[in-house]
Structures are given as structure tokens and as C-alpha cells.
Image (cartoon, rainbow, N blue to C red):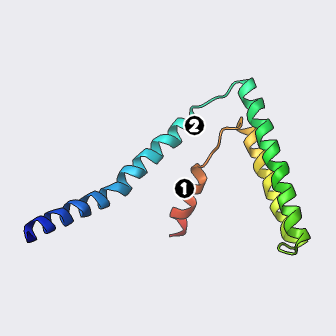
């Protein structure tokens, strides 16, 4: 009975330690695929419309936070400016997300 418990524990430990490695490999493959993607004009227009709707809703949400006293005017302005920059960067990249920088920032901080 003890052998079975030890065997099950060893199997679960091995499986648990290999999961992050497999996950990291999948993530790297996804990033390289995103670099090769190019959307046609209709796809870009559709994504632009959706992002525009999201921006307007987020803008309303931030203004409500200011109205309710959760956010200050300064923080709200910073947040909206950051969102505008993000919107412009997406438009420059043809609305294909670019997450490569985010991954390396965490590695550099450690």
C-alpha cells in the first residue's frame, strides 16, 4: 500500500514539474505566430470598430469612477492617455497585438 502511495506521489510530482515547461513552449510558439499575421483591410476595420467601442466604454467607466470619488482627475487623465497611446500603437501594428516586450520586462526586473 505504501508503495502505491509513493508511486502516485512521484507521478503527480513529475507531472506537476513538467507542466510549466510545456506551457512556456506553447506561449513562445504563439508569439512567433503573431509576428507573421497580417490582417486584410476589412478585418482591420472590424477590429478598429470593436476597439473603439471598448475605448468609449472604458472612458465612461473611468468618468464614473471619478464621479464616485474612486479615482482622482489626475489618475483618470493618466489612464485615458495610456489607453489612447495603446489604441494608437494597435492601429500602427494593424490591430495585431504585440506582447513580446511584456515578457522580457519581468525577466529584466529579476
* Circle 2 SS class: helix
Query: Which quadrant: the N terminus?
Result: bottom left
Q: Which of marks 1 and 2 is nearer the N terminus?
A: 2
Q: In this view, does 26 lie to the left or right of 68?
A: left
Q: Which of 92 and 44 is in front in this view?
A: 44
| Residue 103 visible (yes or no) | yes
**Label 1 sits on residue:** 103
Mark sitting on residue 68: none
Q: CA separation, marks 1 and 2?
A: 15 Å
Q: Position of residue 41 (x, y in %)?
A: 75, 24
Q: Position of residue 19 (x, y in %)?
A: 35, 55
Numbered disc total: 2
Q: Tell me: residue 85, above or below residue 52.
A: below
Q: Tell me: residue 30, above or below residue 61.
A: above
Q: Residue, x 70% and y 24% (percent of image)?
A: 40
| Mark 2 closeness class: few <14, some 14–19, many ≥20 residues within 10 Å | few
- The answer to whether mark 1 and mark 2 are in CB contact below 8 A is no
**Label 2 sits on residue:** 35
Q: Residue, x 46% and y 41% (percent of image)?
A: 29
Q: Residue, x 9% and y 71% (percent of image)?
A: 2
Q: Position of residue 25 (x, y in %)?
A: 40, 47
Q: Which of 55 and 97 is in front in this view?
A: 55
Q: Is residue 105 left or right of residue 77?
A: left
| Residue 77 visible (yes or no) | no
| Mark 1 closeness class: few <14, some 14–19, many ≥20 residues within 10 Å | few
Q: Where is residue 49 in the image (x, y as percent from the top left)?
A: 80, 36
* Circle 1 SS class: helix
Q: Residue, x 78% and y 30% (percent of image)?
A: 45
Amino acid at each position: 500500500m505504501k508503495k502505491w502511495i509513493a508511486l502516485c506521489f512521484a507521478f503527480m510530482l513529475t507531472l506537476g514539474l513538467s507542466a510549466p515547461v510545456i506551457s512556456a513552449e506553447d506561449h513562445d510558439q504563439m508569439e512567433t505566430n503573431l509576428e507573421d499575421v497580417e490582417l486584410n483591410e476589412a478585418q482591420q476595420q472590424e477590429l478598429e470598430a470593436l476597439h473603439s467601442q471598448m475605448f468609449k466604454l472604458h472612458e465612461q467607466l473611468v468618468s464614473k469612477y471619478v464621479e464616485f470619488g474612486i479615482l482622482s482627475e489626475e489618475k483618470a487623465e493618466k489612464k485615458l492617455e495610456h489607453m489612447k497611446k495603446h489604441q494608437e500603437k494597435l492601429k500602427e501594428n494593424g490591430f495585431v497585438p504585440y506582447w513580446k516586450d511584456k515578457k522580457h520586462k519581468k525577466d529584466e526586473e529579476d
